[in-house]
């Protein structure tokens, strides 16, 4: 018994390629006929790029402007620099997803709890956690990216409830 091989139909595929090619050629011809379309496309792409860049840099720039503007203000000349900086940080802080901050305890150091190295890309400004003694809030924290945080307690941290910080873009 002889088995016949079926021929594959290639007409449909090749006709689709021809249609796509024709569509592309029509679009190219329209762009050549009206360069304004190309210019609008370029402006849209550049605008999206600028928006993405500025949104990444925006918080850091706004934070720096807030600090500098308030430090240079005559009405704030008697206010401590640290307090002005702290108020600006609080203005721009937001909650960080808990998956960004990990925690562990070191039994050998008594009940010292260690928040692992801050790799979140945020300046961590507030930490709320619980242990056997209750719920604790650590405010006015300045845990920079790459830093560790130690808390000397009688019982180890069981759960981080939330973390707040300001997005920092380091160069």
Image: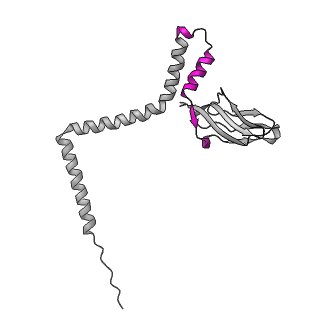
The one of 129 and 9 positioned closer to us in this rendering: 129
In this rendering, the answer to whether 45 lies above or below 92 is below
Residue 133 horizontal side relative to residue 138, left or right: right
Residue 13 horizontal side relative to residue 118, left or right: left
Q: Quadrant of residue 67?
A: top right
Q: Residue lying furthest front in this view?
A: 134
Give residue 76's position: percent from left, percent from top.
Answer: 56, 11
Q: Residue, x 58% and y 40% (percent of image)?
A: 97
Give residue 20's position: percent from left, percent from top.
Answer: 25, 56
Q: Quadrant of residue 131?
A: top right
Is residue 41 inside the magenta stretch?
Answer: no
Q: Which residues are magenta?
A: 73-99
Q: Quadrant of the N terminus?
A: bottom left
Count of marks, rendered view: 0
Q: Residue, x 75% and y 41% (percent of image)?
A: 105
Q: Residue, x 34% and y 38% (percent of image)?
A: 45
């Amino acid at each position: 018994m002889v088995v016949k091989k079926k021929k594959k139909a290639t007409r449909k595929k090749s006709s689709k390629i021809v249609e796509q090619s024709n569509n592309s050629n029509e679009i190219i011809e329209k762009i050549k006929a009206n360069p304004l379309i190309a210019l609008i496309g370029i402006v849209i792409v550049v605008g999206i790029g600028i928006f993405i860049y500025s949104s990444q840099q925006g918080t850091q720039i706004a934070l720096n402007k807030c600090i500098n503007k308030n430090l240079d203000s005559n009405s704030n000349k008697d206010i401590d620099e640290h307090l002005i900086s702290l108020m600006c940080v609080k203005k721009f802080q937001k909650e960080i997803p808990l998956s960004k901050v990990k925690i562990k305890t070191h039994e050998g150091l008594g009940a010292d709890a260690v928040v692992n190295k801050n790799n979140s890309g945020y300046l961590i400004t507030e930490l709320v956690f619980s242990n056997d003694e209750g719920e604790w809030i650590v405010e006015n924290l300045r845990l920079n990216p790459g830093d560790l945080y130690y808390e000397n307690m009688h019982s180890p941290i069981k759960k981080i409830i939330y973390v707040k910080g300001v997005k920092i873009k380091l160069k």
